[in-house]
Image (tube, helix red, strand yellow):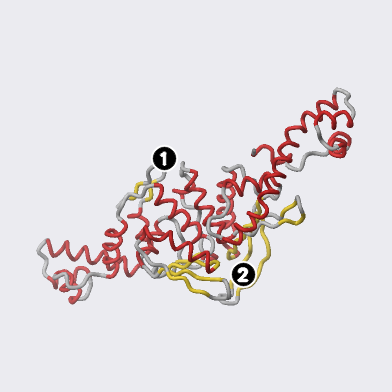
Amino acid sequence: MTYIIKQNIVAEVLVENIIWNSFTEKQLASINNYYMTLFLLSQGFLNKEVREKLNIPLDSVSAWKNNHRIPYAIRILEEFEERYSKKYIEEDLLLLAYLVGYNLGDGNISRNFCNTWFYGIYEDLHRMKELFGLFDVKPVVYNYKIDNGKMAVHDRLFSRLLFCFGAVSGDKTISSFEVPSWIMNAESVNIKIRFLQGLFDSELSCLSAIRENSYTHLTFFQSKRIDLIDDGIKYLNQIKSLLLEFGITTSIVKKDRTYFRNRDSATMQEICFYIHSNSINLDKFVSRIGFLYNSKRNFLIKINSENLTKNSKKELNALELYPQVLELRKHGFSAYKIAKLTHLSIGKVKYWTYKNGKPRAFYFANNF
């Protein structure tokens, strides 16, 4: 069963290979025994001979022979193929990319693959329910802690579908994972945007103004068990690499506080990077990535977007004029004359020419 990604997306998602990882060793053994039993019976072996050869109960051999009982794992495989055996076009993959991104942020799949959860603002989760029509599931949103909510999908097939496309099951703080290769290698920028939107809807900090023309960094945190820090740094560097494809610059990945987790006596450490807070960089993030369903973050973007765009244009203009200012100074023009010619403030021209200062966004210019 192969799912081929169409429309200029290079990767192929081989669900047939990945789905086996969603079964326990006992379930995998039952699959193997079931098919071996059918094969041996077709070769003329008697029930007792099959039992002795495979070391399984005689009742199981009889039930499988007469098709009275099929192993749980086999039923899952058959149901999975019946429901999800299709070729996914890009429109479908946009939904999967968003949900996988959200899972890698503030989502979870139970270890037995029977439940999938997404955490967030109650009203936002209700709006997200529109994403699930393609997958033949009915998510339920629960309200807790005032405005916070939890959306649950109680479906053993849907959980495995997300897992096949790169979602993680169990506790992510003690797991090693990467950005799925079909997203990293996608030629379609929309796939990458949807993945980042899902991730940032759930985990990125909010945009806020410190003063009129200055903003806080957008910070992305992740906690990892201390022995998995290197794996976590590799994953965060992949996210940084995706952002750089859109001209959005970020800090290096930094190690933050270390703490002791009581529930499993594990030593944990936070790692993070931040999106640089100059107006050009933030304006690019807002216009090229942004958020999809997170109403709080979208509201903060809305009230700051006008100033962001205005300041971004000012900084871009300063970057364009900076070389001209230096060239005019080399030719003996005074700061006052340069300010008049370039329509810059005299203070800015003096800062650049007399104090060797540079425009605020000078060090980010190579990414524009």
Query: Which residue is disc 1 drawn over?
Result: 8
Mark pair 2, 1: CA separation: 44 Å
Query: Residue 77 has which mark?
Result: none
The residue type indicated by label 2 comes to: Thr
Residue 258 lies, in percent from the top left, at: 66, 66
Q: Residue at x 56, y 60 (%)?
A: 294
Q: Residues within 10 Å of mark 1 (few under 14, many from 20)?
A: few
x, y (%) of residue 122? 53, 69
Q: Position of residue 220 (x, y in %)?
A: 62, 57
Classify mark 1: helix, strand or loop. Answer: loop
Could you tell me which residue is drawn at 83 percent across and 39 percent down?
357
At 72% from the left edge and 56% from the top edge, which residue is drawn?
209
Query: Which of the 4 quarters of the picture holds residue 303?
Result: bottom right
In the rendered image, which quarter is residue 95 located in? Answer: bottom left
Name the residue tied to disc 2.
267
Residue 58 is left or right of residue 249, and the answer is left
Of residues 36 and 292, which is closer to you in this image? 292
Q: Which of the two labelled residues, at mark 2 and mark 1, occupies the earlier sequence position?
A: 1
In the image, what residue type sits under mark 1? Answer: Asn
Most foreground residue, 13 or 46: 13
Q: Is residue 241 above or below residue 137?
A: above
Left or right of 243 in this view: 140 = left
